[in-house]
Image (tube, rainbow, N blue to C red):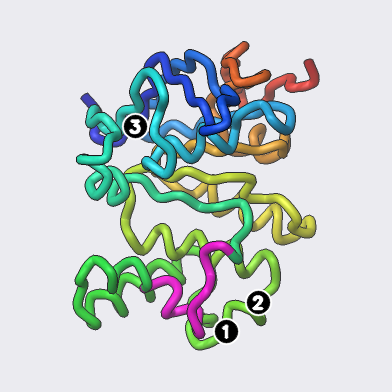
Amino acid sequence: MSHHSLEFLNVSFRYPDGYTALRNISFRIEDGEKVAVVGANGAGKSTLIMLTNGLFMSSEGAVFVGGMKVSKRSLTSVRRQVGLVFQDSDNQLFMPTVAEDVGFGLYNMGFSKNEVEERVGKALKSVGADGLGNMSPHRLSGGQKKRVAIAGVLAMQPDILIMDEPTSNLDLQARQQIIELIRSFSHTTLIATHDTGLIKQTCNRVLILDKGQLVAEERVVSHQVDLSG
């Protein structure tokens, strides 16, 4: 079984108030695939994203990362394998400098200063942000913040990337730069998005959610798919 696979098996999720956000969701993403999940607001995309690395736990069914069931006991291992990029980059950027933000998770895991600096440098370079290390995150543009947030995830060297609306609120140039960045990744990737252009340029498959249910799954042929229906 692939170490880089992601699988949902009959997953449902209910919030504490009783609202059922996901109902009996099953799908599998293989090593190296890039898959989009789409749907109207309230369809369950963000809830699904939160289940991938144990921020939420399924009410029924199970989520598997590389064949390992996501549970309270496996959280440390799961979060080393699954890197989550939030929709709002400000949720991931809170340190005085970019370099400190990118290295935050590594320091928490006990890496040495030299190891952290090496990984941070490589991660920033990989997203085209290697000149931003000493800057305050709050002085960055929206596109720069997104790149730095992605770098912070890449520095952890995850097997699987989970991205929530990675091109939202970006201008056209910054949006295309993020799309090209995603195209360059070899990671197994799940992207929650409304951006059909992003899907056409990067993804192999599309999962379509409606009112918490997986109602369709389409393969992107030559990066072209009809999402109007």
> In this rendering, which labeled residue sits more in front, label 1 or label 3?
1
When asked about the image quadrant of residue 110, the answer is bottom left
* Residue ID at (24%, 66%): 109
* Residue ID at (28%, 43%): 78
* Residue ID at (69%, 22%): 225
Rendered position, 32 above or below 22: below
> What number is the disc on residue 177?
none
Give amino acid for label 3: Asp
For this rendering, which residue is in front, 169 or 11? Answer: 11
For label 1, count other residues whose C-alpha is less than 10 Å away and answer few (under 14), some (14-19) or many (20+).
Answer: some
Give amino acid for label 1: Ser
For mark 3, give the secondary structure. Answer: loop
Tag 1 near tag 2, CB within 8 Å: yes
Tag 1 near tag 3, CB within 8 Å: no
Q: Which residue is mark 1?
A: 136
Task: Indicate left or right for 60 with 76 as reference.
Answer: right
Residue 182 percent location from the top left of the image: 54, 48
Residue 123 percent location from the top left of the image: 41, 67
Magenta part of the protein: which range? 91-103
Q: Quadrant of the C terminus?
A: top right
For this rendering, which residue is in front, 191 or 13? Answer: 13
* Residue ID at (19%, 78%): 112
Identity of the residue furthest to the front in this view = 17
> What number is the disc on residue 31?
3
